[in-house]
Image (spheres, grey):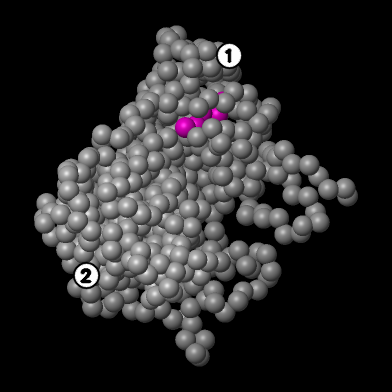
């Protein structure tokens, strides 16, 4: 058998259900071999970056790898952004790329990245992956792939890249491929008993403790149930990062929602007043902390921080810690609960205080969630999507101004059903990657909230949905501009560049007819102009069981939502110190 036949068999023994990618000359023999594995379904995206996003989202819902196969040169280069996006969000993706025959390395043939020597794709992917390799011997192909899978899935997960030159693909080998499980690492990283006991002591003495649930809980199966159990047992309020929104149902009396630049006002008030915060799987990113400015979201070190993360490099990166523990989220929550035991202190006054904060917030936002004015307020739209989401459904939020409305105004009732990519924040991730969700969750609803700019990054994803019969609903917030760019540019400079608004040569607002575009692909489409039309149109789109686009007209003058008192507030003058926590200051 050829190396590609061995790799195709390896796909089978690895238990892969799907692979994503795009055809190309350097992987012809690989695709030929996969014909012999009909039980594994190949999904061809309409662009290599979309294939990576689809595998990324498939993993987020299933916890299972689905390899991505692309050709050399431009095929690989098209995948770089998607791999960086997965790296930032700690999502394992196995990218397998075709390569120049070893006979021709360095000859500057078509699609070879020869500019600094021989084929150099490995160097391109090294900064944006956990590992990057070229297979240089036919008999080591399976060994390299098994090593790549081990790296991708162990410790803090992340994407990996393996390149197979085309002449190695076609070389004859003998033997049976070893499954990845034979080389896998089964690990539960947990803090030592003394450290957990110290954490329990700090929590037990706290008068105003909070739990901050981070995106790491998404990657630690069972941790969201343990979060609920711990919060209830200790009567401790819970806030989340943006990525962990809904980790505790947002209807739970101890849930205050997400905290950050566009989080709930009640969550920010509570974190500022807490005396201890137990942060589990949270990175304390710029958006989450309002650019690390002291007193805006957090008051460390006056507030004691117990920082728990699987990756030790995250602990203490941006804030000083009272106690830093390296642990999987599930293991820590389980161990802390055991260390605390029964008989939690009376925290009723603290809980009543923060619940009053949250009641004020819920009353305040009724002006938006109950709005009837047209065009629809994007906060009202986000709220209605949350209300329409059926049990088992998942919602995906694209990068753009839509995040600043979905984060505060949408209610997530089922943990693990909210998804977005705010790390590398590649536009189009949600709308282009949604087929991965529909394949992972065929009996549930897949709804995407996306701006017109993000959707236009890759509208050909509609063809993928039609070809594979995937019932995805895209809700396009159509304001004929890059809304977050306009608002940011106006705040910073008082004017905008023409790129930010979508216009025709006469200066009139321009976008394609998204309904006609959807119908041209074979999908359904509905134009929504009035607020009262939105919810019925969304319900009908979900019920259709077909790919569907809702083109929703927005008022571009609705301001971006920021938590009260917060702004983007980026540093703009090198010669002036920025008031970020823990930095030295330049002389005034």
Write the start and end of the magenta stretch as one range.
306-310
Find residue 261 and report its horizontal and vertical position in percent.
Answer: 57, 48
Q: Is residue 86 above or below residue 316?
A: below
Question: In the rendered image, which quarter contains the N terminus?
Answer: bottom left
Find residue 424 and report its horizontal and vertical position in percent.
Answer: 49, 54
Q: Which sits earlier in the primary sequence, circle 2 or circle 1?
A: 1
The image quarter in which residue 458 lies: bottom left
Left or right: 165 as drawn, with respect to 263: left
Q: CA distance from mark 2 to mark 1?
A: 58 Å
Callout 1: helix, strand or loop? helix
Query: Which labelled disc corresponds to residue 157?
Result: none
Packing grade of label 2 (10 A; few <14, some 14-19, many >=20) is: many
The image quarter in which residue 435 lies: bottom left
Residue extending furthest toward the front: 103
Give the residue at x 50% y 66%.
117
Give the residue at x 68% y 70%.
494
Res. 520 visible in picture: yes
Find residue 86 and report its horizontal and vertical position in percent.
Answer: 42, 51
Residue extending furthest toward the right: 588
Give the residue at x 19% y 56%.
172
Q: Is residue 58 above or below residue 229?
A: below
Q: Which residue is mark 1?
A: 205
Callout 2: helix, strand or loop? loop
Query: Which labelled disc corresponds to residue 523?
Result: 2
Q: Nearer the viewer, residue 198 or 183?
A: 183
Left or right: 190 as drawn, with respect to 438: right
Q: Is residue 307 located in the magenta-colored stretch of the structure?
A: yes
Q: Nearer the viewer, residue 562 or 578?
A: 578
Give the residue at x 72% y 38%.
582
Res. 381 visible in picture: no
Q: Is residue 423 located in the magenta-colored stretch of the structure?
A: no
């Amino acid at each position: 058998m050829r190396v590609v036949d061995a790799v195709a068999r390896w796909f089978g023994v690895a238990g892969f259900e799907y692979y994503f990618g795009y055809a190309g000359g350097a992987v012809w023999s690989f695709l030929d071999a996969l014909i012999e594995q009909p039980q594994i379904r190949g999904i061809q995206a309409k662009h290599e970056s979309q294939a990576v996003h689809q595998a990324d989202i498939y993993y987020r819902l299933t916890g299972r790898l689905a390899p991505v196969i692309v050709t050399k040169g431009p095929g690989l280069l098209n995948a770089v952004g998607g791999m960086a996006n997965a790296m930032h969000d700690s999502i394992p993706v196995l990218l397998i790329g075709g390569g120049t025959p070893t006979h021709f390395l360095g000859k500057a043939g078509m699609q070879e990245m020869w500019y600094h020597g021989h084929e150099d794709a490995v160097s391109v992917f090294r900064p944006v992956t956990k590992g990057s390799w070229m297979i240089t011997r036919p008999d080591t192909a399976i060994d390299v792939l098994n090593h790549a899978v081990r790296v991708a899935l162990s410790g803090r997960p992340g994407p990996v890249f393996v390149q197979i030159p085309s002449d190695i693909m076609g070389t004859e080998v003998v033997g049976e491929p070893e499954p990845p499980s034979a080389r896998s690492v089964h690990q539960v990283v947990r803090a030592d008993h003394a450290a957990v006991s110290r954490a329990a002591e700090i929590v037990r003495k706290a008068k105003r403790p909070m739990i901050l649930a981070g995106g790491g809980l998404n990657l630690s199966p069972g941790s969201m149930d343990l979060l609920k159990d711990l919060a209830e047992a200790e009567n401790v309020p819970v806030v989340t990062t943006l990525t962990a929104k809904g980790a505790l149902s947002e209807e739970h009396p101890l849930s205050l929602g997400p905290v950050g630049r566009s989080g709930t006002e009640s969550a920010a008030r509570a974190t500022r007043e807490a005396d201890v915060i137990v942060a589990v799987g949270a990175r304390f990113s710029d958006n989450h902390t309002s650019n690390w400015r002291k007193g805006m979201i957090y008051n460390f070190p006056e507030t004691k921080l117990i920082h728990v993360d699987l990756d030790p490099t995250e602990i203490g990166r941006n804030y000083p810690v009272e106690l830093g523990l390296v642990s999987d989220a599930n293991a820590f929550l389980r161990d802390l609960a055991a260390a605390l035991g029964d008989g939690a202190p009376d925290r009723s006054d603290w809980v009543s205080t923060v619940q009053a904060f949250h009641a004020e917030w819920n009353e305040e936002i009724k002006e938006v969630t109950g709005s009837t004015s047209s065009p629809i307020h994007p906060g009202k739209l986000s709220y209605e999507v949350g209300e329409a989401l059926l049990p088992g459904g998942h919602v995906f939020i694209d990068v753009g101004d839509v995040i600043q409305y979905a984060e505060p105004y949408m209610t997530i009732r089922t943990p693990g059903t909210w998804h977005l990519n705010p790390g590398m924040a590649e536009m189009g991730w949600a709308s282009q990657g949604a087929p991965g969700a529909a394949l992972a969750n065929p009996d549930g609803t897949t709804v995407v909230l996306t701006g017109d700019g993000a959707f236009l990054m890759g509208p050909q994803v509609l063809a993928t949905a039609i070809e594979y019969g995937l019932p995805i609903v895209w809700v396009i917030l159509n304001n004929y501009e890059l809304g977050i760019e306009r608002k940011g540019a106006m705040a910073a400079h008082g004017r905008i560049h023409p790129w930010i608004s979508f216009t025709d040569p006469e200066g009139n607002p321009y976008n394609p007819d998204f309904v006609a575009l959807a119908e041209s692909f074979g999908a359904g489409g509905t134009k929504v102009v009035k607020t009262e039309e939105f919810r019925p149109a969304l319900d009908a789109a979900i019920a259709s069981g077909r790919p569907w686009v809702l083109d929703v007209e927005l008022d571009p003058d609705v301001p971006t939502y920021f938590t009260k008192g917060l702004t983007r507030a980026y540093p703009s003058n090198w010669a002036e110190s920025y008031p970020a926590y823990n930095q030295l200051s330049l002389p005034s």
